[in-house]
Image: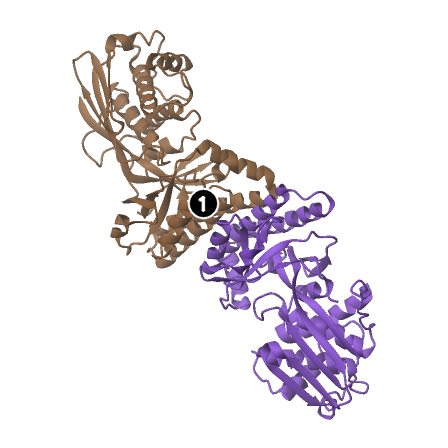
Chain colours: A purple, B brown
Amino acid sequence: MDYIVSAPGKAILHGEHAVVHGKAALAVSLNLRTYLRLKASTTGKVYLNLPNIDAFLCWDLAELKQLTPYTCGKKKEVKHLDAELVRRLREFVGVTNENLDTCNMATLAFLYIYLSLFGSEELPSLTVSVWSELPTGAGLGSSAAYSVCLAAALLCASGAIPTPLWDPTAGWCQEDLELINSWAFQGEMIIHGNPSGVDNAVGTWGGMLRFLAGKIIPLGRVPLLRILLTNTKIPRSTKVLVAGVKDRINKFPSIITPVLDSVDAISCTCEKVLSEMTCEPITGEHYNILEELIDINQHHLNVMGVGHPALDTLCRVTLTRGLHSKLTGAGGGGCGITLLRPGNDETLAQERSFGVQVLLCHRLSSPIS
Amino acid sequence: MDYIVSAPGKAILHGEHAVVHGKAALAVSLNLRTYLRLKASTTGKVYLNLPNIDAFLCWDLAELKQLTPYTCGKKKEVKHLDAELVRRLREFVGVTNENLDTCNMATLAFLYIYLSLFGSEELPSLTVSVWSELPTGAGLGSSAAYSVCLAAALLCASGAIPTPLWDPTAGWCQEDLELINSWAFQGEMIIHGNPSGVDNAVGTWGGMLRFLAGKIIPLGRVPLLRILLTNTKIPRSTKVLVAGVKDRINKFPSIITPVLDSVDAISCTCEKVLSEMTCEPITGEHYNILEELIDINQHHLNVMGVGHPALDTLCRVTLTRGLHSKLTGAGGGGCGITLLRPGNDETLAQERSFGVQVLLCHRLSSPIS
């Protein structure tokens, strides 16, 4: 048993923040991926190697076995965390406070899924190595891509779903994907507390998703879009930003509520245009509209108070090249996306200017494989 | 008979463009004024001196008399232009095309009001001199201030309203003001074709007005606000900008219509806050809200497509001083307003940087006097 699974990160095209208030959001997968290699062994140990964060962990099967006195081994779709197992794991890993560091979060998510899937049988000796093209804490769904990889690889190891066939055209059936997604959501709950489920869904299905009122709808065909992704590297708290928008709505309900309605209409219009682009010849006008929607939404996000001077700079600098940008995700820093047209020079991605750092030029991507 | 009348210019605080689509707008008077001196003479001539535009005109009473074969002399409130008189005047002045220059517009407006008020009696010999602190074509209501001064001075000369008493606390009664306003509107119709009536109303009543669905409501007490007025000197066509907003509404109705609703709510909220500032102690929070409304509306105006890089620069530069700005009027260049707090240094007004030119630091102003 030795295989690699991978899952993409995500970006929000439109609807961040508005989605918290019952409006639609559009999430797309990136071609920045997280990769996981799982290898069976006979060492009597479980190794978890996370080179990105310089963490190389190892446990004896005997000590892990003590953590699962209850009936685990739920290989079916799951909705709720096993609170008792989480409590035991936190004690085992030695975390007490609410703010976990990346290594502890990654460890808890791994051990939770591993023990839940294998706790009722013989625990297997495994070496799991995970590496990623995604920066952590940038709102690009790196934790979800990690959780999706864990869920897929460990479900394979447990026999709940078939093992990857090394044929890129083959894939898991819808039922398998739903099982992977539900276990990845467990990992997200451990890492984020109260995740929306969008990130793990994008990591699992790839492509584009609509998220509306807690429902995640994978969208059919979407055109290949080239997006320049810029990480401002301005640290920010999603929780604080979400609370700030809520405060602003409460302060100026009659002013801000229509803006959320407008964002909703932007997401719907964008979805419609992208759908048209898959079934009719793509024209400059399609891109004109996509660019106008980006500009309008960026203004709306500023109205909600989640902008940042570094993001304004991104918009201004890219506009001097005729390109249109908006923040993606929580805002207040974090990442911005810039839509590229088919003709735009990819060397743009090499530029570093005005204090904003260009990360990567990439395409929408395939789902987990 | 020798007296001076004056009338203020105006700025739109909130609601420009939205007002075209049935939403509320707030207009305030400026302490930039236009002054008119009227002096009776026995020369048998009418002199019109317009030193701002270097125009010094003179007509014999005899030639003017020939222009009024019909019954004129309507000294009552009027609603419609006398199309035949306009036609004769255009021929007399020698304008044929639709785009009049400033001098021709000023001449037509003067002669129209003069002949309408005196045409049925002996035409008086007069010297009328007008000078202004308002730039023309900057959206600050310079033509309306001119028309208000013309109407007030010539109505006095005709005996329809009392002559100014040189007592600044004395003024015209409401009926007199309505008469002045209706004649000023005639002048505006000649100059602009299809004016909203807001500018002449602000010129006549001063203070603050709400304009909604064609109705102009002078608002009661308003606090003294200090506004930095910046003329970007970017030329633009109001007609083209208004048409552009309409196109955008037609292109994205579900996206732009809510933005107009939000602008409407901004005007209402602003009016409420200004009203509170007149009846309770003014606090920093009052200014915080006024500043937030300015920022939000500026984003909305960008969404409508009537922004300009020079206006973005104004906003960015003033924000580095903690000041909040928006465009005022048609946008696409033109003027911007920056709200000053009581503590802000007026020397700010002396700065010239980043290509935007600071015009004047001024206060809200009194009505015509």
Q: Residues within 10 Å of mark 1 (few under 14, many from 20)?
A: many
Where does residue A99 sit, x and y in percent of width and height? 56, 78
| Residue under the point 30% across and 10% down | B120
What is the three-letter code of the residue carrying label 1? Ser
Give the quarter of the figure containing the C terminus of chain A. bottom right
Residue reaching furthest bottom?
A62
Secondary structure state at the residue bearing disc 1? helix
Where does residue A367 sit, x and y in percent of width and height? 72, 63
| Residue under the point 39% across and 56% down | B288
| Residue under the point 63% across and 75% down | A191
- Pick the front one: B220 or B207: B207
Residue at the disc numbered 1: B267
Chain of the residue on which disc 1 is drawn:
B
Q: Quadrant of residue A165?
A: bottom right
Where does residue B157 sit, x and y in percent of width and height? 24, 20
Q: In this view, does A29 lie above or below B298?
A: below
Residue reaching furthest left?
B42
- Pick the front one: B24 or A235: A235
- Pick the front one: B349 or A206: A206
Q: From where the camera sits, is residue A243 visible?
A: yes
| Residue under the point 28% across and 11% down | B64
Q: Quadrant of residue B333?
A: top left
- Horizontal placement of A149 versus A229: left or right? right
